[in-house]
Structure formats: C-alpha cells, structure tokens
Amino acid sequence: MRVVTERIPTLKSVTVGVWVNTGSRNEQPSQAGYSHFIEHMLFKGTRKRSSAEISREIDALGGEMNAFTSRETTTYYVKVLDQQLERAFELLSDLFHHSRFAPKEIEKEKQVVLEEIRMVRDDPEDLVQELHMGQVLRRHPLGRSILGRENTIRELRRQDLLNYIETHYDPEQTIIAIAGNFDQVSLDPMVARYFGKGRAATAVHTNGHHPPEVHGGVLLKKKRLEQVHLCLGIKGAAAGHPDRYALYALNSVLGGSVSSRLFQEVREKRGLAYSIYSFLSGYSDGGMTTVYAATRPKEVDRVVDLVCREIRRIGIKGVERKELERVKTQMKGSLMLSLESSHSRMNKLAKDELTHGRHVSLGDMLAHIDHVNEEQVLRVGRQFFVLDSLAITGIGPLAPRSLQSYG
C-alpha cells in the first residue's frame, strides 16, 4: 500500500483514511452498486467486534468514523484526537481486513440500501443530477448510479461481494492517508503493524479506464412536483488537466458563488429561481460542467435561455480582468478555508496521490491560481464553454411544449 502523510502540529486532531482506487465505474452492469454496498458492510461486524461495538468504540473515542463511495474511489476514515491515533488505526484496520460479511447482516443491509435508493428518488435535486449523468455519459460506466439498481442489490450474494473485493481491493491500488498532529517516528511502525509495510508511489494508475464521451440532447420526465428541476451539461476536463485552474475560475464566474453571473441574472435580477449553481465533475480521464436550477414550469424555457446565453458569452468573450481578479481572490480564500481541518487535508493528500502521483502543496495551488490570466480563460472558454453537445435534463410538471427548440 502507498502511504501519504502531512504533519500539522498546530492541530489536536488526526485523520486516517484508507482509499481504494475503485468505485462504481469499475463495476460490470451486473455488479452495479457493489462498491457502495461493500462500504456499508465494513461497518457491520468483524471477527472481534459487532456493529454495535464498533459504534460504541468510536463514540467512546470522541471521534468520527465514516466512509463514502464515489465513481472512482471508496474511502474509509477515522478522525480522532491525536492521543487516540493508535486505537483509531487498530479499529480501522479491523474493519478493513476482518469484516465478516455475515449473511444475516447482508440481508438487513439490502433493505437499508434500497431505502437509500428510494430516498434519492424522492429528492428531485439528487434525482435530476443522477438522471443527467446517465443521459450525458450513456452506457459509459461513469454514467451509472453509485447506489446501483434495485434488482442487482436484491440479488447480490455474499460470495459476489467477496469476489469483488478479491478482484478490486488490490494493495497497489490502496492508499493510506494520514493528516494532523502525529509523531512520524512512531507512525511508521504503527502503519506497518496494522496495514503492512508502506511505500511511496511513482506512477498514477488508471485501472484500464476508457475515457467518457459527453453526449447532448434533451431528456424530460414528468413528475408531480411544485417546480421543474433542471440540469444543463457541457464538456468539462479531467481532474488533472493542465488548464483546470482556468476552468475552476470560469465555473466560479458562471455559477460557482452568490456573485456569479447565473445567480445574479436568474435569481437576483429576475427572481426565476431560489437555487441555481454550477459545478465541475472531474474524473481521471474526463469531466463535465453542470448547471442546476429549479424554477416554475412556465419559466423553464426562459431559465434555459439565460443559462445558455451566459455559457455562450463566456465561450466567446472570456472574462474581463476585474471580474477574473475578484474570482481568483475568492478561489484562494475558499481553498485556504477548506483546508483548515485534518479531515480535509487527508482528503487532499489522497486525491493528489491518485490524480498526480505526488503531493501538491497549498503554495503551488495558490501560485497556479495567480497565474490564471485573461488570455488563458479566453482560450479555455472557447474550448469548453460551447453548446455543440449541450445536454438538458428536466423533471417535474413540465409544460407540453417545453424546450422543443433544444430537442
């Protein structure tokens, strides 16, 4: 396993994360949801501890223990006070190496995950974004739901999960990330005791992925809601793209903050939406930029027209210096504030290793933001902020002739 660390002696906490370089995109269609289900099962009992004992132990430490699954990774982490580091290591190691996957617990957890799937269906913001991913990426594995499908969850068996772990939980695809207050001399034998001898990585792994292609078109689904929920998507960039900082800046200008063009034009000036924002989704070999908005049925066409106008305007004219400088200052402030906890630093360590094969310092990131200029954002905007492959997804009480001009 690869080990990455950052010592922050001013903190009183330390966070340990185990990152497995596998997620929903690594699943076959018949395995949809396996990565996420395995994440759940690691908390359902080991040879030494029941699920209740696991919960009581982490509460007794006064810490936080959780996990999350993305399209490309599965992460398990513990955050504790610095003096509890070894107990956190032992607990996390026990879950990671010795979970029992008891058949009775699997059957109970199936019902929990099925409820989670239903919860997404009842949340229109989550649902429209999930439908949008499937529409834009179509049959590509990145387009599938992380939670899986109801039939794959109902039919999975214990041996299916164990086989998946055997195939994908490769030590060479696993990273131990530790950030916070710790003593490096005592940390190294601790890592070796609970996870085996670590090593530094020299290459970025791709797991044999094939890059996604962004598809355009319109997908509308009628649903009994008060509003129509919309996603508009255009091509984005991979997580490690050399122009990613310029794209971050363009996203901030478009809809990444309350001073963004979309927030000001659509919400503040016209009162057409309460919630409207844009975000980037960057993966190891591709990405997309998405705008989300919720509005009244009769205003759907108007909102879409305004969003397209701003995308087109940025793609043609770029960003003026004053607006760019304001956005860069905002980006630097947000970045520094986001890295004030051991948990966020642990996340960054692991993502740097997975994406770049090395640690990217905060100073390097701030310097990259400073180097973004008008010429670069104009070039990047002309490359990415185009409507040739615009994808629009909408759910809600749609009018009969909504968005016909985009179909």
Image (cartoon, rainbow, N blue to C red):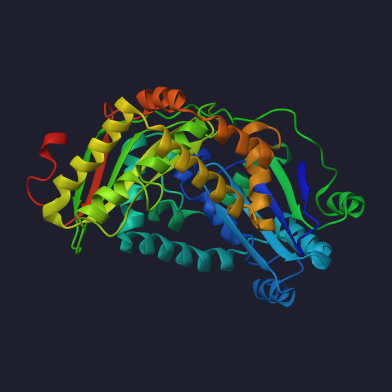
Q: Seen in the image, is 89 located left or right of residue 145?
A: right
Residue 31: percent from left, percent from top: 48, 45
Q: Is residue 251 above or below residue 60?
A: above
Residue 114: percent from left, percent from top: 42, 62
In the image, 110 versus 336, the foreground residue is: 336
Dividing the picture into quadrants, the one containing residue 172 is: top right
How many labels were placed on the picture?
0
In the displayed orientation, state which residue is furthest to the left: 400
Residue drawn where x is 73% and y is 41% of the image: 171
Q: In this view, does 152 lie above or below 358?
A: below
Does residue 217 appear in the picture of this structure?
yes
In the image, 301 versus 214, the foreground residue is: 301
Q: In this view, does 282 lie above or below 374?
A: below
Residue drawn where x is 61% and y is 39% of the image: 366
Q: In this view, does 314 lie above or below 257?
A: above
Q: Seen in the image, is 261 located left or right of residue 349?
A: left
Dividing the picture into quadrants, the one containing residue 203 is: top right
Q: Quadrant of the C terminus?
A: top left
In the image, 45 versus 261, the foreground residue is: 261
Q: Quadrant of the N terminus?
A: top right
Q: Seen in the image, is 123 located left or right of residue 270?
A: right
Residue 64: percent from left, percent from top: 66, 67
Residue drawn where x is 77% and y is 54% of the image: 8
Residue drawn where x is 32% and y is 38% of the image: 233
Residue 222: percent from left, percent from top: 17, 54
In the displayed orientation, state which residue is furthest to the front: 322
Does residue 20 appear in the picture of this structure?
no
Q: Seen in the image, is 292 located left or right of residue 242?
A: left
